[in-house]
Image: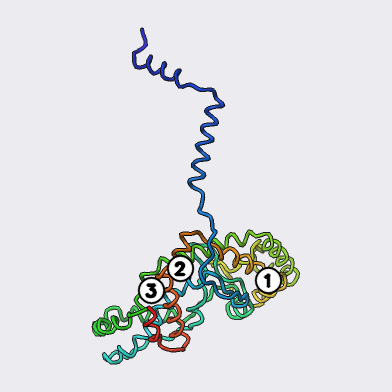
Amino acid sequence: MNASPIRASAGRLIRRIRTPRGVVATLVAAGLVGVAVVNAPAPRTEPVPVPPAQDAAAWTMPLDAAVGVSMDAHDVAEEIRLRPCLAAQGIADEAPAVDPAVLLAPESHADGRRIAPPHDEARAARYGHRPVVDPARAELREWRMARNDDDALGRALDACLPGVRAGVWAHAGANQDIHMRALELRADARERALGDPAVVAAAEAWRDCLVGSSADALRDRGRALPADPMTLLEPRDDAPAVDTGLAGADASCQASSGYRSALYDAQWREESLVTEADAALLSSERARQVVATTAAVREVLLGDGDGADADDRG
């Protein structure tokens, strides 16, 4: 049987475009290089606008202004500012007080990646290796839930919220994308910093120090010592009771081994440069609103004022 015209034509077409194997391989490789160039991340060549002064003890970082404060901190500050107006509306029930230092503490995780400052003696003495928490937060959640269906409170909030959410206080929700982008940039910078040769070498010295000073405590802990000290701060479902002794030794060894200072230098360097697009975002008017809102929230939570004077800065 004769071959079909389509199959015969296909055979002639295949023969017509067949090329030497080396040429094909070169073309494929060139194509892959093209894809890699297109997918390459933008270079980080632009400095972060207006970074704070370097302070390793306070763990200040270039992205602090854009990271701002958490929405929890903002919500508590807003509740404090609402009190005078609510009282005038006949609602005098105040929310349970929470610890402002905990509310303003750096967030410890972003998408599961570590971004908290490394351990220090103050945190070790109070929390061990456990997360920084405030027991009053549970009471605050219950207080809020109990008032969800309060019609009188709802009417009072309708009357009070427009004035309280004026000026810089109107920007918190609208600028959450800047806050989240800064947290992403911080997490990426931390990941790069942990791979810095000076940090890796200091982590080795930290392990030697901790094993030498707390061998029994480590053995009782039932978990191998990690390569990275920051791993000790990761939340664990099977975490033992607060062990301030081991945590204190951890903090002391991080300082004496040079780990804390090496990580600070590396993270500062990695946070200092961003892409052109991120630099434009961080120098935008909305980013300045984040800075103003953060200052207003801190004023209220730390008792420096009610934040009302910040309204004109929005």
Q: Give percent across and percent down for residue 97.
A: 43, 86
Q: Give the Cα separation between the discs numbered 2 and 3.
A: 17 Å
**Which mark identifies residue 283?**
2
Q: Give the Cα separation between the discs numbered 2 and 1.
A: 35 Å
Amino acid type for the residue under numbered disc 3: Ala
Label 3 environment density (alpha carbons within 10 Å; few <14, some 14–19, many ≥20): many
Q: Which residue is mark 3?
A: 172
Q: Nearer the viewer, residue 111 or 243?
A: 111
Kindly indicate whether the residue at mark 1 contacts the one at mark 3 (C-beta within 8 angstroms): no
Query: Is label 1 in a helix, a strand or a loop?
Result: helix
Q: Marks 2 and 3: which is nearer the front?
A: 2
Query: Is label 2 in a helix, a strand or a loop?
Result: loop
Identified at 34% across, 13% down, the residue is 4
Q: Marks 2 and 1: which is nearer the front?
A: 2
Q: Marks 3 and 1: which is nearer the front?
A: 3
Q: Is residue 126 left or right of residue 162?
A: right
Amino acid type for the residue under numbered disc 2: Ser
Q: Give the Cα separation between the discs numbered 3 and 1.
A: 36 Å
Q: Is residue 274 left or right of residue 225?
A: left
**Quadrant of the rendering where the C terminus is positioned:** bottom left
Q: How many marks?
A: 3
**Which mark identifies residue 103?**
none
Q: Give percent across and percent down for residue 82.
A: 34, 85
User: What is the residue that sits farthest to the right in this orientation?
Assistant: 212
Q: Nearer the viewer, residue 184 or 37?
A: 37
**Which mark identifies residue 254?**
1
